[in-house]
Amino acid sequence: MKIAVISPHAGRLTEMGAVLRAQAHQVSLAEGDKHHMRLVAEQERPDLMLVDGSICDMHDLSMVEKVTASFPQMAVILLCATQNQDFLIGAMRAGVREVLPSPAPLEALNAAVGRVAAKQPGGGHKAAGKILAFMSCKGGSGATFLATNLGYQLARTSSVLLIDLNLQFGDALSFVHEERPSSTLADVVREIKRLDALFLAGSAVQIAPNYSILAAPEDPAQALTIKPEHLEAILALAVSRYDFILLDVGRSLDVLSIKALDRAHKIFPVIQASLPDLRHARKLLALFKSLDYPQDKVELVVNRFSGNGEIGLDEIRRTLSVDTIHTIPNSFKEVNDSINHGDLLAEMQRSNAIVRNLASFALSLGSREEESRGFFERLFKR
């Protein structure tokens, strides 16, 4: 569910955002008061708006009623420090769904949001998230860059968790974030008995609203502690909480990476248009065939593709016997700059051809139609 939270208290905003995102809601946060309601409603078009700490007497309710009348599909929950019977009755007449104390106990907040979600189309039953695995056929093909930056595009309309499964040398987080993670996949596994939605969300690094990365272990030796059954438990929870789970799979094939590929809805082998890449890709695709993966589960990605290169798409199709090929344009300098700075390419070069390409790619992967309206306008508006 898409939720907008308004509060004059930055700390409370952060806390509520973390709690709601742990339940796989798409959350936007606005630091402000009741005067921000209409602007936030117009910009975000949320299913639910939570307004904290600024509407606590009868005089404020006329503003609320104007907003609820203008956006009848949007539910409103108020969080107020003090309440009385007249105010509660007035709030309901103004179109408010519920009134909670401020600050709200987390259990009460989750319960109220759950009641709103249950009345949304679909009765509150969330479809299982899609698992997408990215894997370089040859070192340097660019799978990590594509996975991390595609995750950001998907997160504009969906909740996304990227898990770095390159356990010995994984550095997906560093592609989009400069600081070291406070916890990693190895830490989650060490405390696997504590695994729940809040623990998983808290163990990942938030890159953007609705987009987090669970980093690979800092010490390669810790990779030995991660077993297929651990990954199975994490993925089983993740698909119930996130719309998309992206797996950055290392090039070495072992029982853990095969477990990841088995669970994936789609596998995206990444190559560049070179003979060595084609040779590696042919071996990998043969392995996928031996694992009985259906042909439509595997979709090739050709990175840094130039239409006037020596090896064209027809030759790639012929050599690898594939039908579906995604191409990513070449923008070496800009991509290299974004990786070196640890920043998303979309934040550095909004009009870059790769950013536009990945935005289209994200939409093709199943972004919800009603939320994709105005997608490109939002993407490039700043």
Image (cartoon, helix red, strand yellow):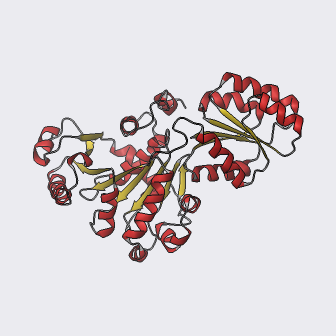
Q: Above or below — where is 191 with respect to 85?
A: below
Q: State the residue at coordinates (41%, 72%).
A: 226
- Residue 85 visible, this angle: yes
Q: Above or below — where is 365 with respect to 232?
A: above
- Residue 176 visible, this angle: no
Quarter containing the C terminus: top right
Q: State the residue at coordinates (61%, 29%).
A: 43
Quarter containing the N terminus: top right
Relative image position of residue 61 (x, y in whole percent) = 81, 29
Q: State the residue at coordinates (45%, 45%).
A: 127
Residue 105 sits in quarter? bottom right
Relative image position of residue 338 (x, y in whole percent) = 44, 48
Residue 362 sits in quarter? top left
* Residue situated in front as seen by the camera: 159 or 23: 23
Q: How many marks?
A: 0
Q: Is residue 95 left or right of residue 310?
A: right
Relative image position of residue 364 (x, y in whole percent) = 36, 36
Relative image position of residue 276 (x, y in whole percent) = 16, 55
Q: Is residue 189 left or right of residue 334?
A: right
Q: State the residue at coordinates (52%, 57%).
A: 178
